[in-house]
Amino acid sequence: MMTDRNRRDQRDALTGTATLPAMHRFLEAALDLSEPQGPRVALLAIGIDGLGSLTARHGPEIGDAALLAIADRLRGGLRAHDLVGRLPEGFCICIPEALTTQARSTAERLQRMLETAPLATPQGPIALRCSLGLALGHGPGSSAQALMDRARAALAAAQEAGGSRIILDQ
């Protein structure tokens, strides 16, 4: 039986996205169900470039509003069986049953969606820039932690390279 505490442990209190432990469980299941020779499990790590300075300039309520709006945009731009989760540095998205080209085009589409329309805030519109790290895995026995680490490392590389870009972990 699911208790209220268990539900809270699965959903980020601010954005309603999956928590990191819930995302790990979902990734493990997706990897275990994937075929070694079939489509892969893609994991996107998304960082909002300059989110810390946005919060410092406009206050934590604007930062929280931005995170909530971004989570809503991400959920609206995905298939029903994809999962959006929260990372300390932004968000992650698990895309089961994806070919490499599909995962890359999804990353490009989500980046355009986040960057082209400014966020409406009480202090006026705020433009977003985001960086994405993309990693792919498949087959039973693959590690959700290793896939998460690779996607986050690719995200860090994208941000270190100047931001507003997508890096695919090979």
Image (cartoon, grey):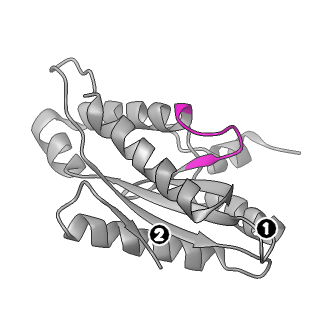
Query: Where does residue 28 sit, x and y in percent of width and height?
Result: 73, 68
Q: Is residue 32 above or below residue 117?
A: below
Check disc 2 and give the amino acid type. Ala
Check disc 1 and give the amino acid type. Ser
Q: Give the range drawn in magenta.
A: 76-84
What secondary structure predominates along the stretch shown in magenta? Answer: loop
Q: Is residue 163 above or below residue 57?
A: below
| In the image, residue 40 lies in the stretch drawn in magenta | no
Query: Where does residue 100 sit, x and y in percent of width and height?
Result: 57, 64
Q: Which residue is painted at 68% across and 67% down in the image?
A: 40
Q: Which residue is painted at 24% across and 46% down in the image?
A: 129
Q: Residue furthest right?
A: 1
**Relative horizontal placement of residue 22, taking residue 157 as reference (left or right):** right
How many residues crowd mark 1 within 10 Å: few (<14), some (14–19), many (20+)? many
Q: Which residue lies furthest to the left in this view?
A: 57
| In the image, residue 83 lies in the stretch drawn in magenta | yes
Give the quarter of the image for residue 124: top left
* Badge 2 element: helix
Tell me, yes or no, if residue 14 can be seen here: no
Q: Residue furthest front?
A: 101
Which residue is more in the foreground, 165 or 92? 165
Q: Quadrant of the N terminus?
A: top right
> What residue sits right under mark 2 in the picture?
151
Query: Where does residue 133 sit, x and y in percent of width and height?
Result: 41, 64
Which residue is more in the foreground, 99 or 119? 99
Query: Where does residue 119 sit, x and y in percent of width and height?
Result: 28, 27
Q: Which residue is painted at 29% across and 73% down in the image?
A: 157
Q: Which of marks 2 and 1 is in front?
A: 1
Of mark 2 and mark 1, the one earlier in the sequence is 1
Give the quarter of the image for residue 144: bottom right
> What residue sits right under mark 1 in the picture?
34
